[in-house]
Amino acid sequence: MIDYETTRFDEMNALIDRWAEQSSGRRTATHTMIGQDREARNHYVDMVEFASYEEAMKNSRLPETDRMFQEMVALCEGMPKFMNLDVVRDEHLNKQLADRVFTEAAMAGNMSVIDECFATNYIDHDTGKAESTVIGRDSMRSDMETWRAAFDMTFEPQAQLAEGDMVTTVWNWRGTHKGTFMGVAPTGKMYEMSGSTTFRCLDGEIVEGWWHYDTAALQMQMGASGSPYGT
């Protein structure tokens, strides 16, 4: 973290852009963020993220970083303050919200989570449904109950990305067929498919969701030709 004051922030911005361009292919920084103090507009804090302390030190030894430091000091009012911080707690609350839908509702069957996590006017976009856009969290509850009645299922996250108010989870799904589904009587067999879900979150609730999954692969495994929702 770099704490500094400057009246020449436009020049500082340009300096950072030059460093990013000149150090391309060598720098080890993975994420940067600059904050401006609302109470003291010349006060800034830069936060630079690295995979480890060792990677941060490798980045510091780059000649481009040394040149940037010298030029940065010249743009500041006084000497910038540098701090090397270890992350001791890192939580993305929107990720936690998304995870609850998969683990507590879809997999564990706690349908009260639907009311806790989804807005009443939740907008659902589902490529597997004939009516691809539905409004209301009750539709999510109904869909979840349909799948749970047909399968004992698990979602295995493969990747998850959160940015702004959006969270995308890429997952693998496995389900043991225990109830009639797409016109197919229970087989007791396990089926698999892959997919992704993107949730948009607002004020601690999921307000919109996009579901993409390989229903064709599931239908081929089951020998079915219908829709999960009977339409």
Image (cartoon, rainbow, N blue to C red):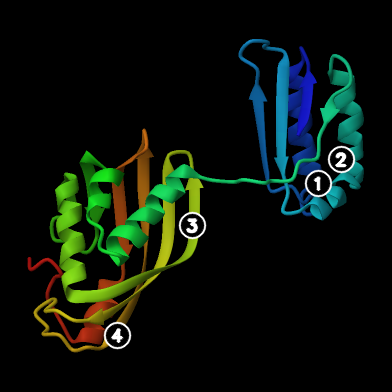
Q: Position of residue 163 (x, y in %)?
A: 50, 43
Q: What residue did someone put label 1 on?
A: 23
- Residue 65 visible (yes or no): yes
Q: CA distance from mark 2 to mark 1?
A: 8 Å
Q: CA distance from mark 1 to mark 3?
A: 28 Å
Dots 2, 3 in contact, CB < 8 A: no
Q: Amino acid at mark 4?
A: Met
Q: What residue did someone put label 3 on?
A: 160
Dots 4, 1 in contact, CB < 8 A: no
Which residue is drawn at the image coordinates 23% and 42% (left, top)? 122
Q: Is residue 77 toward the left or the right of residue 224 in the image?
A: right
- Residue 26 visible (yes or no): no
User: Disc 2 or disc 1, which is closer to the eye?
Assistant: 2
Q: What residue did someone put label 2 on?
A: 65
Dots 2, 1 in contact, CB < 8 A: yes
Q: What residue did someone put label 4 on?
A: 190
Please, is residue 107 above or below residue 220 in the view? above
Q: Earlier in the sequence, mark 4 or mark 1?
A: 1
Q: Earlier in the sequence, mark 2 or mark 3?
A: 2
| The C terminus lies in quadrant | bottom left
Q: Position of residue 185 (x, y in %)?
A: 11, 85
